[in-house]
Image (cartoon, rainbow, N blue to C red):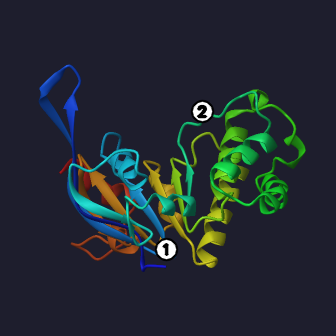
Amino acid sequence: MSAHAAEFSAVSKVYRVPMRPSRTVRALHPISFAVEAGEVFALLGPNRAGKTTLLKILLGLCQASEGHANRLGRPLSDRGTLTRVGYMHENQAFPRYLTAAGLLDFYGKLSLVPGPVLRSRIPELLERVGLADRTAEPIARFSKGMVQRLALAQALLSEPDLLVLDEPTEGLDLSARHLLHDVVAERRTAGKTVLIVSHALGEVAQVCDRLAVLVEGRLAYLGTLASLVRDPATGQERTLEAALTPIYSS
């Protein structure tokens, strides 16, 4: 595998305003950084910072206006690399008539997981996320937290080299958040890459090796948590919120 699980080189994005083709909105100014293979990387920033747009570009859901990006060492045009990516969306839109096992079977086939592997992996994953006793129950009966647990299982189905978690702590109770942290640690130990996209600063920062902060479509910080929280004037450690306040307000 390439040393980079994701790489952005001067990537920018401009949207045209619907019904006003002469007007445009810039969602991303030129951004360059790389996510190394095997690291846990956090992409942080307030709402409307450009996080979702950058993620859509990485996943091939929209195209950059300028610049280029690679996914797992290959150009984004190589869509075969998508089978090596697991994605947990912020807002799930699962068919509610499906059962938990039925949903994983459906997504597993979409991800080209071989049938015998899928049949053994589905019960293992449902057990891992605490849904083994709800296997045959329609998703319509699930709470938001249970749907999030199922979404995590779905993202892990293909044993991805790159696991992308979009606002993964939304709707999770304390035990589920511990589960998420354990899964992230397991992926790191296995040499896999985890990309966490979130505005929940504290929890995400605790588990990441490096982080990038976007503000108004610009890369405002790239580095380790230790460097971010060190006060440049005093050298003393400060809270994450105190470190981010001048970045967000600049």
Q: How far across and how far down the image is residue 91, in percent?
A: 55, 36
Q: Residue furthest left?
A: 22
Q: Residue at x 34, y 70 (%)?
A: 34
Depth order, front residue of 24/133? 24
Q: Label 2, on which residue?
A: 93
The first of marks 2 and 1 along the sequence is: 1
Within-10-Å neighbours for mark 1: few <14, some 14–19, many 20+: many
Q: Residue at x 63, y 54 (%)?
A: 111
Depth order, front residue of 83/173? 83
Within-10-Å neighbours for mark 2: few <14, some 14–19, many 20+: few
Depth order, front residue of 153/225? 153
For residue 154, side relative to residue 141 (left or right): left
Q: How far across and how far down the image is residue 54, in percent?
A: 34, 51
Indicate which disc residue 39 carries.
Answer: 1
For residue 216, side relative to residue 204 (left or right): left
Q: How far across and how far down the image is residue 145, in percent?
A: 69, 39
Please state which amino acid type lies under the numbered disc 2: Ala
Residue 76 sits in which quadrant? bottom left
Evaluate whether residue 173 shows in this view. Answer: no
Nearer the observer: mark 2 or 1; the answer is: 2
